[in-house]
Amino acid sequence: MGFERVDYDRTQHAGYAKGRRLLPVSRRGWSRAFREHAGERRVRRAVDIGSGTGRFTPALADEFGAEVVGVEPSVRMREVAHIESAHPLVTYVEGEAAALPLDDASADLALMFLVWHHVPDHAAAAREIARVLAPGARLLIATTLADRLKDLVLYRYFPRTREIDAALFPTSVETVDLFAEAGFALASLTEVRHRSADSLAEYAERQRMRALSVYERLSEKEYRDGMTALEHAAATAEGPQPVEASCDLLAFTRL
Ligand SMILES: C[S@@+](CC[C@H](N)C(=O)[O-])C[C@H]1O[C@@H](n2cnc3c(N)ncnc32)[C@H](O)[C@@H]1O
């Protein structure tokens, strides 16, 4: 299956901050997971690669009391980040995973949250991330892995998104091998459970904003059919049922 790249400047920036807004409980849960897998090294400087609208960038600064550089190629996503995710310890700069505007060995932690599948040259990006991380520093990657797909509510209503994910994402072994090649050792691979919405109705409202890049790969009919089924389920649901999801988190140590 061939995939076109998703252009965040053209489409996704508009609904992203609202459609993907982090619930406070999820922000806390992810911050705990980042802390747990950040290793022993004191984090003075972190880099959020593909920081987007800055959903996690201030959370990293708060959790570690660290200066954080959010590196993001899309000017429109950076514009939203400057407005919605400003923080005294955070700066948002232009760049991409394979060209990071940071000095050699200058960061103690790197995060890539739902970014890895957008990166065109994985080997070049892994080498570049290795360059900017100090020895012993951790790289955290939150991503879907083709061999570890979860039972997502998304897949239930938009079944072809599961097929797309299986073809689009690398496997865990491919990812670990690629980073080993660039000078990293796998420290952990865990599953983080988080809340996507407080109810199915809230989840449906978020999906209406189409703030998932996978929707760009569905036909208009597939998207509409999914929304109809989802809205029907939301309207007939008894009481608010929180929507939870799991996501894999890989932690690598820079050797
Ligand atoms: C799904 S969004 C995730 C944004 C943010 N990490 C979050 O979780 O909200 C993917 C982001 O990756 C960015 N991106 C695309 N290609 C990239 C690359 N080669 N290097 C770094 N970021 C990239 C996009 O512009 C977009 O902002």
Image: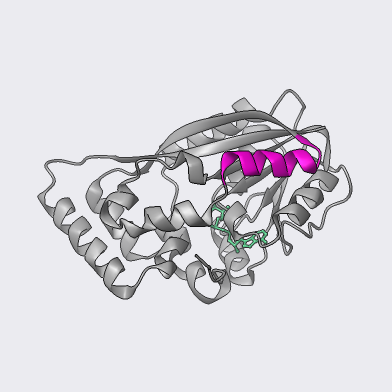
Q: Is residue 177 magenta?
A: yes
Q: Is 223 or 57 nearer to us in this picture?
A: 223
User: In percent of the image, x 48 and y 33: which residue is there?
Assistant: 192
The answer to whether residue 144 is seen in the rendering is no
Number of callouts: 0
Residue most toward the right?
104
Q: Which residues are magenta?
A: 171-184
Picture coordinates of residue 92 (x, y %)? 69, 58
Vertical comparison of 107 with 157: above or below: above
| Relative horizontal placement of residue 75, taking residue 23 as reference (left or right) | right
The answer to whether residue 161 is seen in the rendering is yes
Q: Which of the 4 quarters of the picture holds residue 23?
A: top left
Picture coordinates of residue 85 (x, y %)? 57, 54
Which quadrant contains ligand 1? bottom right
| Relative horizontal placement of residue 136, taking residue 28 as reference (left or right) | right
Q: Is 89 or 215 nearer to us in this picture?
A: 215
User: In percent of the image, x 67 and y 38: which residue is there?
Assistant: 176
Q: Is residue 82 magenta?
A: no
Vertical comparison of 192 with 19: above or below: above
Residue most toward the top?
40
Vertical comparison of 178 with 210: above or below: above
Q: Quadrant of the C terminus?
A: top right
Q: Which of the 4 quarters of the picture holds residue 63?
A: top right
Picture coordinates of residue 73 (x, y %)? 67, 66
Q: Is 233 or 26 nearer to us in this picture?
A: 233
User: In percent of the image, x 55 and y 34: which residue is there?
Assistant: 31
Most frequent secondary structure within the magenta stretch: helix
Colouring scheme applied when the structure was drawn: one colour
Picture coordinates of residue 246 (x, y %)? 42, 38
Residue most toward the bottom?
10
